[in-house]
Image (spheres, rainbow, N blue to C red):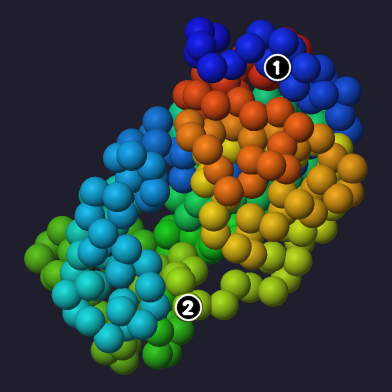
Amino acid sequence: MKDEQISAADLEQVSQWLKDAERIVVFTGAGISTDSGIPDFRGPNGLWTQNPVAEKTSTLSYYLNDPEVRKVAWEGRVRNFNGTAQPNDGHRALVHMQRAGKLTAVITQNVDGLHQDSGIEPVNVVEVHGTIKFGRCWECKDRRPMKYFIERVIAGEEDPDCELCGGVVKSDAILFEQALVPEVIDRAFEEAGRCDVLLAVGSTLAVGPANQVVPRAKAGGAKVVIVNGDTTHMDGYAHVLLRGSISPILQALVAGAGFLT
């Protein structure tokens, strides 16, 4: 671990917290998946930073009402969610926490399904913003694997509609202006409030209400550790800030906690 911004003392302290904890909860954002080739949104090279128009694809009213926005969205799905992305060392570090019997939940803003692909038990993944693994008709609610729609785009359809009713198809990811599933966000808050250590990883922690897991965890007495490549909106809640490359930091933490044996 050679990141100049991170002290050995901080790594040792957080590793000890992880080792001593009975209930570890990890909250993840897009930054944990960038090493898998999936771009984040607000980082220096983020999808929205490089192309502000792309942010419209994540806003429900634009998506439903503008075919051009949907075409951009489908191009992005083919490029970034075509099934080729694989879990990286950051995802695998969380699997070591699970094997150690310490990890009680992964609360994620991500929709890529890479936590489950890495070996995290699906029941322990709380997907507060839904999933890209399936597409659903906005009208008749017919639901099919995303692979089915991506194959249609590759075959030449720019904006594949529902074959049953002709309605607009969107992924099961939750967009801006779309309500979260109450029981999902409630479970996220419950898990955060009961943990001993909360690791917030790869998120700017700018989007609510999901970002409220951080103050919920601290109010419940948990140690709060933020791991990110840049500052976040919740840095003031952290007991320790670990700023640098995410995958090496997580690997160093699980090694220091003795979870690799």
Which residue is found at the position 20% from the left and 59% from the top? Answer: 75
Which residue is found at the position 33% from the left and 39% from the top? Answer: 44
Work out which quarter of the rendered image holds the C terminus and state it: top right
Q: Please state which of residues 106 and 149 is positioned toward the viewer in this rendering.
A: 106
Circle 2: residue type: Glu
- Residue holding disc 1: 10
How many numbered discs, if any?
Answer: 2
- Element class at badge 1: helix
* Relative to 81, 197 lies left or right: right
| Residue 138 x %, y % | 40, 84
Q: From mark 1 to mark 2, how far is it between C-alphas?
A: 39 Å
Which residue is found at the position 64% from the left and 46% from the top? Answer: 234
- Element class at badge 2: loop
| Residue 112 x %, y % | 45, 50
Q: Is residue 27 above or below residue 253?
A: below
Give the farthest residue toward the front.
Answer: 236
Work out which quarter of the rendered image holds the N terminus and state it: top right
User: Mark 1 or 2, which is nearer the eye?
Assistant: 1
Circle 1: residue type: Asp
| Residue 250 x %, y % | 60, 24
Disc 2 crowd, CA 10 A, few/some/many (<14, 14-19, 20+): few
Q: Which mark is residue 177?
A: 2
Q: Is residue 92 visible?
A: no
Q: Quadrant of residue 211?
A: bottom right
* Relative to 146, 79 lies left or right: left
Q: Please state which of residues 235 and 143 is positioned toward the viewer in this rendering.
A: 235
Q: Quadrant of residue 78?
A: bottom left
* Relative to 61, 90 lies left or right: right
| Residue 68 x %, y % | 17, 75
Q: Earlier in the sequence, mark 1 or mark 2?
A: 1
Label pair 1/2, CB-CB below 8 angstroms: no
Q: Is residue 127 visible?
A: yes
